Amino acid sequence: MTKDDEVWFVLTFGGLFFGLSFISVVGQVYLYFFQMRKILSCLSSSRGVLMRKSSLSRGLFGAYLMFVCVGSYLVLPSWAIRGGSLDESDYLNFPCGLLCAIRFFYLAALGGGIAMIILLIGCKYMGWIE
């Protein structure tokens, strides 16, 4: 028989995982359909974006790959600038509202991933997963 604490644990972290994952997926779809041209025009001189621009012709999977790269550049800009993938002037001239939206969607995905890992570890500890 399961305890109330176990049920609350699964409901809390399962809800966090599904909620944050939903926010991330909806946000990425929004960025793809409504903001892609603006993002590509603002990052037109960044080497990492120019190298991955050809992947957009591969359909939805290619666009997802492109947005994962762009999201990682904008969430951790100092690493991307130091590595040469992101141009510093592109980053400084990037629209603030769009930058905050991209960071929010990708940090939601990171939070969902962390919630999933905690959920899996907790379920393994409780003996629900062998």
Image (tube, grey):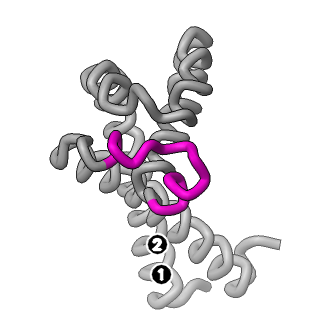
Residue under the point 39% across and 47% down? 24
- Distance, label 2 to label 1, CA atoms, is 6 Å
Number of the label disc, if any, that sits on residue 21 = none
Say whether residue 89 is left or right of residue 72. left
Number of the label disc, if any, that sits on residue 13 = 2
Q: Quadrant of the C terminus?
A: bottom right
Q: Amino acid at mark 2?
A: Phe
Badge 2 vs badge 1, beta-carbon distance below 8 Å: yes
Q: Amino acid at mark 1?
A: Phe
Who is closer to the viewer here, 41 or 112?
41
Residue under the point 75% across and 71% down? 129
Q: Quadrant of the N terminus?
A: bottom right
Q: Is 89 placed above or below 37 here?
A: below
Say whether residue 84 is left or right of residue 130. left
Residue denoted by label 1: 9
Q: Position of residue 125 (x, y in %)?
A: 71, 86
Residue under the point 53% across and 19% down? 60
Stretch in magenta: 78-91
Mark 1 closeness class: few <14, some 14–19, many ≥20 residues within 10 Å: some
Q: Position of residue 66 (x, y in %)?
A: 53, 30
Residue 51 can be seen in this image: yes
Who is closer to the viewer here, 85 or 72?
85
Q: Is 9 placed above or below 63 here?
A: below
Of all residues, the one furthest to the top in this rendering is 57
Q: Position of residue 15 (x, y in %)?
A: 40, 64
Q: Main secondary structure of the magenta part?
A: helix
